[in-house]
Image (cartoon, rainbow, N blue to C red):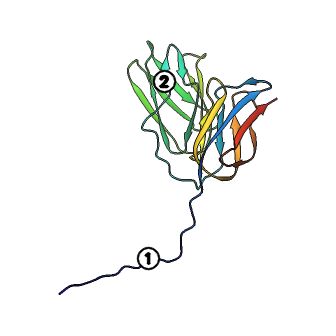
């Protein structure tokens, strides 16, 4: 005996997914490029893109590296001490408040950045050390490179509100249409 089973799917076609665009642009102050600016698009309901396997804010040569870091809400940032001295990393202003206490060379501490905002990072022992962690509630963000250029990869085509932040400058915000030939040129005056 032969049994035949027929399976019928919906005859209505699903709407095509929007095109994904790598949004590129440049950050500037006046006519010169502005490195290390954080740029993001509002999209709190955006996809749950895979998180980076490790996010590190290193301590080396009595400095933080990188000095500007952007992460998505819920990211765990590692603070390894790869220096030759003890450090005490903390943030008491705005954003995530924490104090990692004194810890020696070759050890590491972790902090979960669980809400959006800016955290100013310092070392209690070395007042010249400073960094910034910008926490955003969107999968579409980046930090501009040394040449001021940036790319936010795989953004669904559409209209968004952009934001840009850089230490010591006012925030920039406005509308942007993400399309295959679009670019985002941001300028602080």
**Residue at the far bottom in the pictured view:** 1
Separation of marks 1 and 2 at Cα, in angstroms: 53 Å
Q: Residue at coordinates 57% horizontally, 66% vertically from top-left? A: 15
Badge number at residue 52 = none
Asked whether 143 or 114 is in front, the reply is 143
Please say if the residues under marks 1 and 2 sit with CB atoms less than 8 Å apart: no
Q: Secondary structure at mark 1?
A: loop
Report x, y in % for residue 118: 63, 36
Asked whether 9 or 74 is in front, the reply is 9
* Lower sequence index among marks 1 and 2: 1
Q: Quadrant of the C terminus?
A: top right
Report x, y in % for residue 41: 65, 46
Asked whether 143 or 156 is in front, the reply is 156
The image shows a total of numbered marks equal to 2
Relative placement, left or right, of 182 versus 122 is right
Task: Name the residue tied to disc 1.
Answer: 9
Please, is residue 18 above or below residue 3 in the view? Answer: above
Please, is residue 95 above or below residue 87 in the view? Answer: below
Q: Residues within 10 Å of mark 1 (few under 14, many from 20)?
A: few
Q: Residue at coordinates 69% horizontally, 28% vertically from top-left? A: 167
Report x, y in % for residue 3: 23, 84
Task: Name the residue tied to disc 2.
Answer: 58
Asked whether 153 or 54 is in front, the reply is 153
């Amino acid at each position: 005996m032969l049994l035949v089973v027929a399976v019928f799917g919906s005859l209505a076609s699903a709407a095509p997914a929007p095109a994904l665009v790598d949004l590129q642009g440049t950050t500037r102050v006046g006519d010169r490029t502005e490195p290390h600016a954080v740029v993001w698009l509002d999209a709190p309901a955006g996809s749950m893109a895979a998180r980076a396997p490790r996010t590190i804010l290193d301590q080396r040569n009595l400095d933080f590296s990188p000095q500007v870091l952007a992460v998505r809400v819920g990211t765990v940032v590692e603070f390894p001490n790869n220096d030759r001295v003890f450090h005490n990393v903390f943030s008491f202003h705005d954003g995530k408040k924490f104090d990692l206490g004194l810890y020696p060379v070759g050890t590491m501490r972790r902090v979960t950045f669980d809400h959006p905002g800016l955290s100013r990072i310092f070392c209690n022992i070395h007042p010249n050390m400073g960094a910034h962690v910008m926490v955003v509630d969107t999968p579409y963000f980046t930090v501009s490179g040394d040449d001021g250029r940036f790319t936010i990869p795989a953004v669904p085509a559409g209209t968004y509100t952009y934001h840009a932040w850089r230490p010591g400058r006012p925030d920039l915000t406005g509308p942007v249409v993400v399309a295959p030939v679009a670019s985002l040129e941001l300028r602080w005056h």
